[in-house]
Amino acid sequence: MSSSSRMGRFTVWDYVVFAAMLLISAIIGVYYAFVGGGQKTSKDFLMAGRSMTALPVALSLTASFMSAVTVLGTPAEIYRYGAIFCIFAITYGLVVLCSAEIFLPVFYKLGITSTYETLYTGIVIYAPALALNQVTGFDLWGAVVATGVVCTFYCTLGGLKAVVWTDVFQVGIMVAGFSSVIIRAVVVQEGIGRIVNDSYHGGRLNFWDFNPNPLQRHTFWTIVIGGTFTWTSIYGVNQSQVQRYIACKNRFHAKLSLYINLVGLWAILVCATLCGLALYSIYKDCDPWTANQVSALDQLMPYLVLDILHDFPGVPGLFVASAYSGTLSTVSSSINALAAVTVEDLIKPYFKSLSEKKLSWISMGMSLFYGGVCIAMAALASLLGALLQAALSIFGMVGGPLLGLFALGILCSFANGIGAFVGLVSGFTISLWVGIGSQIYPPLPERTKPLYLSTAGCNISSGNITSTEIPLTTVFSTPGAERPALADNWYSLSYLYFSTIGTLVTVVVGIIISLLTGGLKQNTDRKFLLTKEDFLSNFSWSETEQPEKVEVLNWKPFTMADEGTDNPAFSHIEMDVASDKNKVNGLHI
């Protein structure tokens, strides 16, 4: 099935399908630029007027969480390492629970700032374009520029409301792309039973590995514990995600959106897993990566699509559209978040005389600016080459200490600025130490456990290629080079624990330093902390009188106050604006 002579290339119909996806995304932006009077205020533009309901926000959260890395990378991960990746289904549940019950109650009242996303958005645009170009012949820079321009266009015109509803459309495209591959693979393999049977005999159904060794790349414990910290740092305290929570019309809808979104996460994970198992079933005797048909694992899915769907014009274009839907949703979230941070934290405090109409226009200008920056960053990403994986890993290391910083502030009322600063620096130092060390001295194959790949069934006239199991290597390692003592223990720690270590070090050091320096000297407004009332924030107890007193749990709507918490990016303390009852906005005196 894998002969290169049978491989197709992109046709006109594939480009038409891809262009249609971009066009519909742009139309959604135009629609929300003018419907309901357009974006009259910065609040309308950046926060959708705080009028969103749970379902569209839930789908938007799913789309933003699942980038093109999911569409291209997760099936390849399962092909190479097996279905133990599915344990992330448990992790997603824990991440949503932590986000909804610990962080959301506080962030709904306040908000956070996250401005380290700009380079990542460029990588998100460029990386899938490169993978798809090398396999399909899809024009590389045409795709990069088109994606960046369309994304910037609908973010600039329609604001957060356009971003959310475009995400809803793009989730549908992602599921359709996955489904087309799964259905065709089942037909080619004459049933799902053969795919499952091949995967079982090939060791891909390795769901359960309870080895407690933290040096193993993926086990039940590294995925559940480490994965929860890693993804909560992205999902629970990331500006682009939190901005959606607080765009909901009340806290009940905000929490409900998270729990509905969990179903979407599971659905995407199931689709990606089935694609990964189909990859193995079809190529179990002739691995395209080992046979040099593709140069990287993330090219396997585009390769499969052109292999099994080349007789169906337009369907490969649908798959590419699904990959780019993940890209658009991620990048649009970042552009809108960066615009919110800039306007609310850097412009409003210093230009207080600006009208809401002018702030709305400035917000649009910021979206346009950051869209251009993202395209420029995509050009920069093209120059990173082998450093790309290292750059992405460093972004992961940064998330843990930031999660620890927010957890310290929300959960520890006595934590002070000195403790928070020292804790954050300590967390960054430790997580960067282990993370960079693991790039220089990557774990040995027995730690990563790559599974068997065969080329016994390939018809390669030039090859000395035989059935083999290929260890992972990186450009940073030299075969046979002397490894320091830390290389096979500290630097071999599972990458999923990088965020865990950063979080725990930040919290523990922050608590110790805060206690040693006397703790916080002033009273803290309870809205900055997680309180016991937040755990039942959507409900209230009441007693019935007849025929006897019975306690009843009632739904209690909660809307965000406009006073003192108007900033969708970060609710800073405004010390110069006094309000009633000897209180300064954000801080009791």
Image (tube, rainbow, N blue to C red):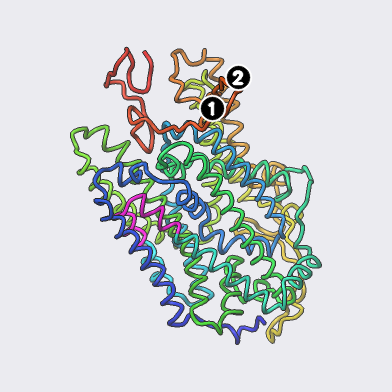
**Residue bounds of the magenta highlight:** 150-168
Nearer the observer, 184 or 413: 184
Q: Nearer the viewer, residue 245 or 524?
A: 245
Question: Which numbered tag is attached to residue 408?
Answer: 1
What's the mark number on residue 546? none
Residue 172 shows in the view: yes
Amino acid carrying label 2: it is: Lys
- Say which residue label 2 marks: 549
Q: Which is more toward the observer, 256 or 288? A: 256
- Residue sitting at x 31%, y 55%: 32
Binning the other alpha carbons within 10 Å of mark 2 as few (below 14), some (14 to 19) or many (20 upward) gives few
Q: What amino acid type should be assigned to the residue bearing mark 1?
A: Leu
- The C terminus: image quadrant: top left
Farthest-out residue, right: 201
Q: Does the magenta stretch include residue 1?
A: no
Q: How far apart are marks 2 and 1 (CA)?
A: 41 Å
Q: Quadrant of residue 1?
A: bottom right
Above or below, 286 relative to 269: below
Q: At 51% across and 21% down in the image, what residue appears?
A: 415
Dot 1 alpha-carbon crowd within 10 angstroms: few under 14, some 14 to 19, many 20 or more: many
Whether residue 352 is situated above or below residue 469 in the rendered picture: above
Q: Decide: marks 2, 1 in contact (CB < 8 A)?
A: no
Q: Is residue 159 magenta?
A: yes
In this rendering, position of residue 19 left or right of residue 360: right
